[in-house]
Amino acid sequence: MRVLLAGGGSAGHTSPLIATADALRRRLPEVEITCLGTERGLEGRVIPEAGYRLELIPPVPLPRKPSGGLLRVPGRLRAAVAATREVLRRVQPHVVVGFGGYVSMPAYLAARRAKLPLVIHEGNALPGIANRFGARFCTDVVATSFPATRLPHAQFIGLPIRRSISTLDRAEMRALARDHFGLEQDAPTLLVTGGSQGARRINDSMCAAAPAMAAAGVQVLHVKGPKGVVELPETRGVNPPPYVVVSYVDRMDLAYAAADAVVGRAGANSVTEAAAIGLPAVFVPLPIGNGEQALNAAAVVEAGGGLLVDDSAFTAEWVSRHLPPLLTDQTRLAKMGAAADRLIRRDADDVLAGLIIDRVQR
């Protein structure tokens, strides 16, 4: 069986794509997988690193607001569709699978023209433009990460996540994880993430509140992002707990295992991964976009598995007032973790792989 997986631009598209590719390989070791992306996105690095073939097509950015860029979309889309049709001619896939983003729109159009089976997966609670378009004519499989996502023909299966996360036993891995990052074994531990996109508020507020965290005996593992800037104030006292700053983590399973709670954005991957392993979370949605991040976190927050804080409200004062009491309250953390864990299924990668295989075998 030959499969073309289309998705790129950010981890929100590439992570579920790779998780699904891995699930397909587990089920069908002989499967031939080709991935479709653009040279602008994260996929240029992470997909080859994951061991999958990557074909590149021209990007088709879709402006969120009326602008001169809209006039260039039709020409760019025609070029991208033509490039995708050439990839289809060479690869001869039995099915095309799209995960949204710039690369998926031309993939959907080319697949429809070639009369190929089409499978769509939407990662966010609020669907993007490409998947809203594709779902209008896709009657094969339209899958969603969240039950309230509105798309034609949609079925809720969850978000495919990496097996290293979905099978993680945090308690079993905690000692190894804390050693790995140079953290103390017994101190309450906060993981802070945000990545390179929109993490400035989180980075600045956490740094300014570092003395309050130290005074409460809370240690921090802070993933600042490749372009993030972290300037820690002087921490007074004898032997303050570690505040470890790293640019990037390639073993998020260990970062999660080391933590008692996490602070970060509310992308679909972040929400799903934290909830799936029962890690209490403080979600700080990006203040830009169409509000999908707050919607992603809504179910977990309503169930009591996380807190939702507006970007503008996530100040050093808020951090100093709320996070030390949270991290030092093991009973509250346990209740939050249990509430989150009951919401999220961990097998969406296998479920989606099964749907893809079933569609080809009809």
Image (cartoon, helix red, strand yellow):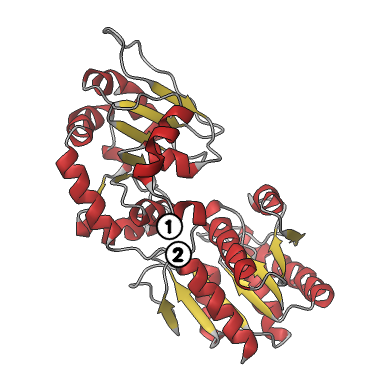
- Viewer-nearest of discs 2 and 1: 2
The residue beneath circle 1 is 268
Seen as rendered, the residue at the extreme bottom is 362
Judge the density around disc 1: few (<14), some (14-19), many (≥20) Cα neighbours within 10 Å: many
* Of 83 and 319, the residue lying toward us: 319
Residue 159 — which label? 2
N-terminal label among 2 and 1 = 2
Question: What kind of residue is marked 1?
Answer: Ala
Residue at the spot 22% in from the left edge and 50% down from the top edge: 336
Rendered-image quadrant of the C terminus: bottom right
Q: Residue furthest front?
A: 172
Q: Quick check: 232 left or right of 105?
A: left
Residue 314 at what x, y percent from top left? 29, 36
Give the residue at x 50% y 28%. Answer: 246
Q: Is residue 194 visible?
A: no
For the point 55% across and 70% down, which residue is it?
Answer: 130
Give the x, y percent position of residue 323.
23, 33
Q: Secondary structure at mark 2?
A: loop
Alpha carbon separation for disc pair 2 and 1: 8 Å
Residue 188: where, in percent of width, then height?
Answer: 27, 30
| Quarter of the figure with residue 248 | top right
In the image, 301: left or right of 274?
left
Marks 2 and 1 in Cβ contact (< 8 Å):
yes
